[in-house]
Amino acid sequence: MKTREQLKILLLQIRDGEQVRREEHHSFADYCGVVPKQIDILNVFDTPEFPQTAADDYDALLVGGASEANVLRPEQYGFIQGCQDLIKHCAETGKPVFASCFGFQLAILALGGEILNKDVGFEMGAIPIRVADGAADDPLFHDTPDGFFAVSVHRQFAQTIPSSCQLLAYTDECIHSFKLKGKPFWAFQFHPEVDKATLIERLTFYKAHYTDGDGQLDRVLSAAVETPESNILVRKFVDRVLLGH
């Protein structure tokens, strides 16, 4: 088993803006408990074509979120099929995967599920997440309290998961986390790598994309809370899955 300092992780990044690229990279590194240089980046806006074996030489694959792409528009964003192929290959080979938000949606599609769309009334902010019965024996969720808060901002969502997956967390609106049965593969519709401070920074940056103006933005941000139980899931993945602690 490797030490934390020996880990090499690949981040499949779907970010176009330089500020958010950098923030996402450092957020994942911080919550993984590694230094940024241990996480290599495959950004699909820079490299839209890549092999499905791109993560083979890494200890794990992280998949981040996206505000400049829509998973339901593969004709507009040509890298979407390649992302799905990479995720499916990792699932088949047992490569550890931790997929967040857009990564969750890619994983649902890669595993044969369905993603839906909602243009108004979608989840936005720090929201309470319910823990499913199937989480009781899960390596990451077994000690996560029901009703924990997490950052969630998304128009696309899933109401069901493929039969190959185990439901771990949900809200009344949608599925929020699942594990691929028998594989070290987790996906989260919410953002475990994003905390309250980053939510405020990111929503302010993307306010024209997600909100109808300063009034809605102020309401969402004033209701934001800290999300420690969500954020620690990233560290649990590294400690319990990659390092075997």
Image (cartoon, grey):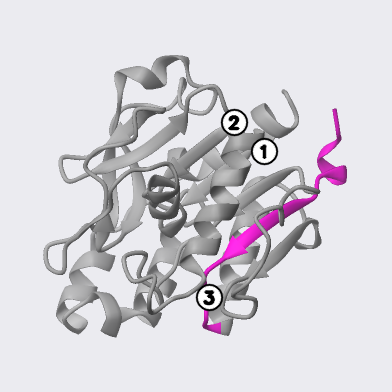
Residue 192 coordinates in the image, percent (x, y): 47, 48
Q: What is the distance, in whole Å, between disc 2 and disc 3 at their CAs? A: 27 Å
Mark 3 lies on a secondary structure that is helix
Mark 2 lies on a secondary structure that is loop
Residue where numbered disc 1 is placed: 95
Residue type at mark 3 is Val
Q: What is the distance, in whole Å, between disc 3 and disc 1 at their CAs? A: 26 Å
At horizontal 46% and vertical 42% (from top left) the residue drawn is: 187
Residue 62 coordinates in the image, percent (x, y): 60, 51
Residue type at mark 2 is Pro
Answer with left or right where residue 127 lies relative to residue 206. Answer: left
Mark 3 / mark 1, whichever is N-terminal = 3
Mark 1 lies on a secondary structure that is loop
Q: Where residue 20 is drawn, which disc sits there? A: 3
Q: Quadrant of the N terminus?
A: top right
Q: Nearer the viewer, mark 2 or mark 3?
A: 2
Residue 233 coordinates in the image, percent (x, y): 52, 38
Q: Quadrant of the C terminus?
A: top right
At horizontal 28% and vertical 33% (from top left) the residue drawn is: 147
Mark 1 / mark 2, whichever is N-terminal = 1
Q: Where residue 184 is drawn, which disc sits there? A: 2
Q: Nearer the viewer, mark 3 or mark 1?
A: 1
Q: Tell me whether the residue at label 1 lies in contact with that at label 2, contact meaning CB atoms closer than 8 angstroms.
A: yes
- Disc 3 crowd rating (10 Å Cα; few below 14, some 14-19, many 20+) is some
Residue 48 coordinates in the image, percent (x, y): 59, 75
Answer with left or right where residue 128 lies relative to residue 3. Answer: left
At horizontal 81% and vertical 45% (from top left) the residue drawn is: 7
Residue type at mark 1 is Lys
Segment tinted magenta in the rendering: 1-17
Quarter-of-image position of residue 139: top right
